[in-house]
Amino acid sequence: MQYISTRGGMPPQSFSDILLGGLAPDGGLVVPTELPKLDKATLEQWRGLSYQELAFEVISRFATDIPASDLRAIINKTYTKEAFGSDEITPLKQLDPTLYILGLSNGPTLAFKDVAMQLLGNLFEYVLEKRGQTLNIVGATSGDTGSAAEYAMRGKHAVKVFMLSPYGKMSPFQRAQMYSLQDENIFNIAVTDMFDAAQDIVKAVNNDAEFKARYKIGAVNSINWGRIVAQIVYYFKSYFHVAKNIGDPVSYVVPSGNFGNVCAGHMARQMGLPIKRLFVATNENDVLNEFFKTGIYRPRPETLATSSPSMDISKASNLERFVFDVVGRDPRKLAELWTQVEKGEGFDLSHSEFFGRMQAEYGFGSGRSSHADRIAHIRKIHQDYGVVIDPHTADGMKVALENRDIAVPTLVLETALPAKFEETMVEALGQKPARPAGLENLEQLPQKIEVMAADTEQIKAFIARHVS
Ligand SMILES: *Cc1c(COP(=O)(O)O)cnc(C)c1O
């Protein structure tokens, strides 16, 4: 399997080559030259596999340059009951005859990002060791991504993580989760400014080519192809669980921000998994809902702060991978559209043949949710089924109940546990959500942070000091 850029400007590369990189050199996203196609007989065979066996079958078709026995060992070491709370890894909860919640948030940081990031940590370590290289990850986080990355990379010899976060702006739980890590290779830098300032510093570090090369700076952002591949697995696993026969329709509703999670669903469908519909659920930052409803993609100049904060984005970076398929994998057409995005204009497919295909050929639909909807759905699901869902999953539930075909099994992806978002949960249910065992006293643990001004040079100096 070889990888190319959506914009056509990258010679084909192997999985291990693209794994450690970010954007393709031409600014595009990395995609496989073609997706593996699975026939019905293969799907029948995969039905009975455990999560780990299935993960191997799926991922080995993408990571073709990693020897099978090595890949199997990496997967078995990643997807354990110890890390994810059960042998099922991503358990299903049935609410009514055709409504389910797919539990993706039982990893160490209580959000679905662990499913991919835990694998990435082990893949990075493997590839770096093979190549005798080291990597220094520099990132900015407003919450979930940073902690998922730190828990994935902690204790890894060839990797150091420098994570910038806005000082005092995250929830006490999120802060404690990150700052209580004492591993020597993890550096929490709390910047006395907003998230955007932290992100600008990361950009500035990456734009300094000499610094970047000298200190081997890398990233683990949401456009990493390895993360998408790892997320494809649970679409297969849950389909097999719910469908009586291979070929039966099953639909998914995905709380979305950067379009990474639902992009994996799209890939699973393109590989031949009989998914009927893929619904994108957004919060008040509804750039994706607008795109799927109208064909107009109009990234916003500003992002609203909402009570489902992990979906607060105004530009969905992984959307480029889907649109690449929609325009018939034509890199010139794609590059033309994204030139308009980069100019801040966005693009309009409403009058083109492409718009109709998004639903008819690819099964996409969408919806949005507001704070009031979110609170109402946390209450409703608690009242009707005795199940407590987090604010992001509630956004998905709202879109599911509004759109589902009651005859088709519909799976709402649970992207975080309620324990991460106490304030909104208290508003909805009048009490604090339960915490997984072992995290009761998280906020009391000693914390290790560097508080620094939003000063790029000072932060670069800090990185340089701790790398060499
Ligand atoms: C990251 C995140 C999302 C959005 O996922 P994308 O892959 O960016 O679309 C939704 N919910 C939670 C809790 C998240 O952490």
Image (spheres, helix red, strand yellow):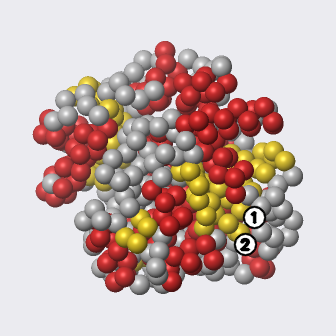
The residue depicted at 32 percent of the width and 32 percent of the height is 166
The residue depicted at 61 percent of the width and 64 percent of the height is 365
Q: Is residue 336 left or right of residue 270?
A: left
Q: Is residue 127 left or right of residue 77?
A: left
The residue depicted at 32 percent of the width and 38 percent of the height is 195
Mark 1 / mark 2, whichever is N-terminal: 1
Q: Amino acid at mark 2?
A: Pro
* Residue 110: image location, x then y, percent: 58, 37
Q: CA distance from mark 1 to mark 2?
A: 7 Å
Q: Is residue 148 left or right of residue 166?
A: right
Ligand 1 neighbours mark 2 (CB distance < 8 Å): no
Front-most of residues 372 and 410: 372
Question: Quadrant location of the C terminus?
Answer: top left
* Residue 235: image location, x then y, percent: 67, 61
Marks 1/2 in contact by CB < 8 Å: the verdict is yes
* Residue 161: image location, x then y, percent: 34, 42
Identify the residue at the far top of this view. 444
Q: Secondary structure at mark 2?
A: loop
Q: Which residue in the structure is indicated by mark 1? A: 250
* Residue 6: image location, x then y, percent: 39, 75
The residue depicted at 42 percent of the width and 17 percent of the height is 446
Q: Is residue 395 above or below residue 409?
A: above
Residue 145 at least partly seen: yes
Residue 266: which quarter of the image? bottom right
Q: Which residue in the structure is indicated by mark 2? A: 274
Residue 72 at least partly seen: no
Q: Amino acid at mark 1?
A: Val
